[in-house]
């Protein structure tokens, strides 16, 4: 049955209604959220890694929840794709007596586009949550596991182009000229990707979001690849255009923002700014391509591992155009067959240190059920070569050729960290990898990270990592642009929460 349009609807787990099953045991109420802990309320280390002489600890999976694939949001469309970009609404994350509450700000990508891109207006949703970490050793049923992380849908806000024109999800086949005053005026737009000359509205494929104290937010995009800032009401404020090496150009050097053609230089189609995060203390905004640019080897999975991370000073964005202040090369992990595992999100941890979500595309929603790599890894740019404002920002000077990095560049140091596919950890929450292909199979496309302090004085460096999947709007009872659709499979919007120890991380950097 199709879920209700009503707002403030709980996505409650079925556990409390099935066979009278008890709710899962929760941590000692004196253990979390009030600055105290005891040895029974803290999970033990699953693994640890060392980076730059600092030890980081993964304490395992401590929460799971989902939003059903057929839930309908307030515009009348299916609520889907929301794992593309998540953040905590600034200042909402709270802790009390073993429970944590807050509001997630989430952004889907470009709508249900199984066959082709559609005229889907960019938007953000606000979803409240109640999180009760589970630190027990017994395995929970899939239904009981969902009581650890419960959601309440609140609202949907649409995003708008200039002059309150609707944005679109269509692959852009035209370019809007820059506004007068660009680049000298801080808020003037550069060349913009638009759906077509007949429909000259901004096309967005949103993949990263950062919510700000004043209610505005940064949104990273794959088409540009650009970074946009929108106001609380969804109106466009400004646009950040990256260096020329990132911009998609054809063989004649013309900008071409389409994702449907193979171009000559710049980002690969559907491999744009998938990754976005903010150092809130220093107002430095970071964005990273999902994998290498075309000129850097991006067309072949065996040569696409060297991606680029950029940093912008956004301390006074409305007065001064955000300035590029750094650019580094990040070596992505590869499979045993040397195929690159692209990065779906990053999260700033502390100066020079980041989490990175690298994965394959296997699991629920894919034809191959068994995944081999889904991880929240760590990398550091401390000691790496800063290549911003150098010849490498010209696409004529690639950073890598045939998968071999230019010897003048020292890349970031990258280490594996949190394994989403840990069999024992998944089993604790009724999940699995591989057969059977059912609702308990881990989703294929995990694409976002959000970080919050555990608020435990005994473990001041402990944080929760919230992570979410992009279900691609796959539902047998879907609605898109007012029309019903049947995608042939139901893929729920899954969420997981891990607990980790991140020395050097600070609430000031994270934004709590």
Image (tube, rainbow, N blue to C red):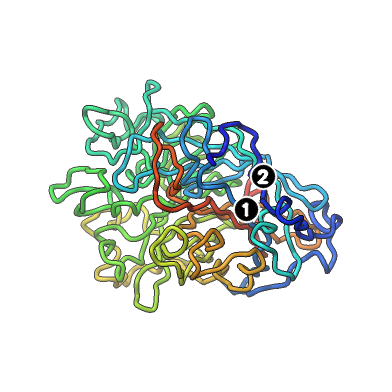
Query: In the displayed structure, would residue 224 be above or below residue 298?
Result: above
User: Where residue 59 sits: x, y (%)?
Assistant: 68, 68
Q: Quadrant of the C terminus?
A: top right
Residue 25 - label: none
Of residues 345 and 443, the one drawn nearer to the viewer in this rendering: 443
Q: Quadrant of the N terminus?
A: top right
Res 464 quadrant in image: bottom right
Q: Which residue position is annotated with label 2?
A: 129
Q: Position of 243 compared to 19: left or right?
A: left
Of residues 6 and 459, the one drawn nearer to the viewer in this rendering: 6
User: Where residue 147 sits: x, y (%)?
Assistant: 70, 53
Q: Secondary structure at mark 2?
A: strand
Q: What is the residue that sits farthest to the bottom in this orientation? A: 336
Query: In the displayed structure, would residue 489 be above or below residue 368?
Result: above
What is the spatial separation of the Cα atoms under label 1 and label 2, in whole angstroms? Answer: 10 Å
Residue at 47% x, 49% y is: 84
Residue 65 - label: 1
Q: What is the residue that sits farthest to the left in this orientation? A: 252
Q: Position of 124 compared to 58: left or right?
A: left
Rate crowding at label 1 as few (under 14), some (14 to 19) or many (20 or more) other CA atoms within 10 Å.
many
Of residues 240 and 129, the one drawn nearer to the viewer in this rendering: 129
Q: How many marks?
A: 2
Q: Is residue 90 visible?
A: no
User: Where residue 121 sits: x, y (%)?
Assistant: 40, 33
Give whichever of discs 1 and 2 has the lower sequence position. 1
Rate crowding at label 2 as few (under 14), some (14 to 19) or many (20 or more) other CA atoms within 10 Å.
many
Check contact, mark 1 vs mark 2: CB within 8 A: yes
Q: Is residue 114 visible?
A: yes
């Amino acid at each position: 049955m199709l879920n209700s349009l009503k707002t403030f609807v709980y996505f409650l787990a079925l556990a409390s209604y099935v066979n009278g099953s008890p709710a899962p045991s929760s941590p000692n109420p004196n253990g979390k959220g009030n600055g105290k802990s005891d040895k029974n309320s803290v999970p033990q280390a699953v693994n640890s890694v060392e980076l730059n002489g600092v030890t980081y600890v993964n304490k395992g999976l401590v929460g799971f929840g989902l939003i059903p694939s057929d839930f309908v949001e307030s515009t009348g469309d299916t609520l889907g794709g929301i794992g593309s970009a998540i953040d905590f609404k600034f200042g909402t994350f709270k802790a009390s007596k073993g429970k944590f509450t807050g509001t997630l700000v989430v952004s889907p990508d470009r709508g249900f586009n199984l066959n082709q891109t559609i005229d889907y207006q960019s938007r953000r949703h606000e979803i409240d949550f109640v999180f009760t970490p589970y630190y027990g050793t017994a395995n929970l049923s899939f239904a009981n596991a969902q009581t650890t992380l419960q959601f309440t849908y609140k609202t949907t806000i649409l995003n708008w182009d200039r002059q309150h024109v609707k944005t679109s999800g269509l692959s852009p086949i035209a370019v809007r000229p820059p506004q007068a005053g660009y680049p000298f005026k801080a808020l003037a737009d550069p060349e913009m990707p638009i759906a077509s000359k007949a429909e000259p509205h901004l096309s967005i494929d949103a993949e990263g979001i950062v919510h700000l104290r004043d209610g505005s937010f940064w949104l990273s995009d794959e088409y540009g690849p650009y970074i946009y800032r929108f106001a609380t009401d969804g109106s466009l404020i400004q646009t950040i255009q990256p260096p020329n090496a990132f911009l998609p150009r054809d063989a004649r050097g013309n900008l071409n923002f389409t994702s449907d053609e193979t171009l000559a230089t710049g980002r690969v189609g559907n491999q744009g700014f998938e990754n976005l995060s903010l150092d809130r203390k220093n107002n430095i905004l970071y964005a990273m391509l999902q994998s290498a640019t075309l000129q850097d080897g991006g067309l072949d999975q065996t040569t696409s591992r060297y991606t680029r991370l950029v940093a912008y000073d956004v301390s006074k964005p409305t007065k001064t155009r955000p300035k590029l202040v750094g650019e580094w090369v990040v070596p992505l992990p590869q499979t045993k067959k040397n195929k690159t595992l692209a990065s779906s999100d990053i999260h700033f941890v502390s100066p020079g240190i980041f989490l990175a979500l690298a994965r394959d595309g296997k699991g629920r929603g894919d034809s191959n059920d068994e995944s081999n790599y889904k991880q929240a890894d760590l990398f550091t740019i401390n000691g790496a070569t800063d290549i911003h404002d150098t010849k490498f920002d010209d696409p004529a000077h690639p950073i890598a050729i045939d998968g071999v990095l230019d010897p003048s560049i020292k890349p970031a140091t990258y280490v594996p960290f949190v394994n989403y596919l840990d069999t024992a950890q998944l089993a604790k929450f009724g999940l699995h990898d591989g057969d059977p292909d059912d609702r308990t199979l881990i989703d294929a496309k995990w694409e976002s990270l959000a970080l919050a302090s555990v608020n435990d004085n005994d473990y001041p460096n402990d944080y929760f990592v919230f992570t979410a999947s992009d279900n691609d709007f796959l539902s047998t009872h879907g609605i898109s642009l007012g029309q019903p659709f049947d995608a042939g499979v139901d893929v729920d919007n899954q969420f997981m929460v891990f607990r980790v120890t991140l020395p050097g991380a600070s609430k000031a950097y994270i934004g709590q």
